[in-house]
Structure formats: C-alpha cells, structure tokens
Image (spheres, grey):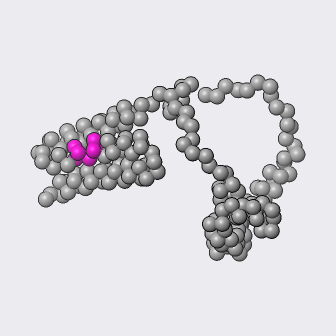
Amino acid sequence: MSLSLAFILAFGVGVLVAFGGFALLSLREGERRAARVAAILAVVGSAPWFLATLLPPTGIALVALGTALLVPAAAVLLFRPGRGTKGDALPIQQPRHRFDERDIMFARARLRPGSPEHAAYYRMRPENRAGDDQTRRLPGLMSLDASLADPLAFAATESSFELIDLLRGSVEATVTAEKPALP
C-alpha cells in the first residue's frame, strides 16, 4: 500500500472515529438528534475517503474536493441554522428534568460544617459527603499551601479582588427604565 493510500484510509478512519465517537457520546447523554446528525456526518464524511482508495490519483483529488464541499453542506442542512423562535439559531428548549442547584459543586463548597444547611444537605444526599469532605481538606483556591502555589500570581490576583472591593462603593446604582435591544 502506498503512502498516499495509507493517508487517505487513515483520514477516512479518523473522520469515522471522530464523528462516530461524538454520536456515541451524544446517545449516552440522551441527545438523540445530535447522535443522529453525528452518525450521518460520520458516514457522509468517511465513505468517500474509503471509496477513494479504489480510484486513480485524479479521482482521489476529486473525492477530496467533493468531501471538502459536501461535509460542510451536509452539516448546514442537518443543523438547519435559522430555525427557532424570535430569530434564534436554535429553538428554545424546555429542560427534560428538574435539577436541584444545591447539588452544584460550588453550592456544596459554601456549606460550612456544623451549620444547619450542612446537616440538612448531607441528610438528603449522604452519597456526596465523602467526596466533599475530601475536597474541603485540600488547601483551597490561591492558598500558598497548594502544591503549585505561585506567590506572585496569587498576590496579583488577590490585589485585583481587593481593588474591586474598594471600587464597589464608587459605582452609581441608578438603573435605567428602558432595556436595550439585544442583537
């Protein structure tokens, strides 16, 4: 097998694996439409490369050019830009299930051991406690005890936060009555 045929075959496999992997990941996340689009792009994008291994060099060049034009065109047709409501590129979607925002890691990081909120949350979600306690034992953001601590960078960051706190009182808090139109 010549080097050019090996490259063409490898490119076809790469396209198939990339879009196929995206399709499988989308299926696992319950996103059927994204999986369908990725699967179509996997076939449309890789099949010409596999077929090109059977062609003479001029045919290979035509397949490369055709694929370079076909895949973006297929993506545009499958993603159907411009559909939706109020000119949005995508339609407004309702969440499929409710999500308790107390389960977000940043919300859990604010829970202080011994507080009523801490006790109530871990009564409700005891499975999160071990991992959260382990995270709380870590040095923390911008701690000089961290393994990759950079005193100069941490001092610059801390001074930025202090400047923001100092300037907060200088902000005039008049709210305009009219809302600007969003682009």
Residue 136 drawn in magenta: no
Q: Is residue 76 visible?
A: yes
Q: Quadrant of residue 150?
A: bottom right
- Residue 72 percent coordinates (x, y): 35, 37
- Residue 171 percent coordinates (x, y): 85, 41
Please identify the quadrant where the N terminus is shown.
bottom left
Q: Quadrant of residue 181?
A: top right
Q: Is residue 124 above or below residue 176?
A: below
44 relative to 112 in the view: left or right = left
Task: Report the span colored magenta.
Answer: 43-49
Observer-nearest of 20 and 121: 121
Observer-nearest of 29 and 97: 97
Please identify the quadrant where the C terminus is shown.
top right
164 relative to 82 in the view: left or right = right
- Which residue appears at 38% of the width and 49% of the height? 23
Q: Main SS of the magenta segment?
A: helix
Observer-nearest of 96 and 143: 96
- Residue 29 percent coordinates (x, y): 46, 51
45 relative to 130 in the view: left or right = left
Q: Is residue 135 visible?
A: no
- Residue 11 percent coordinates (x, y): 27, 52
Q: Residue furthest front?
A: 123
Q: Is residue 133 above or below residue 124?
A: below
- Which residue appears at 69% of the width and 61% of the height? 124
Q: Is residue 113 above or below residue 175?
A: below
- Which residue appears at 36% of the width and 32% of the height? 77
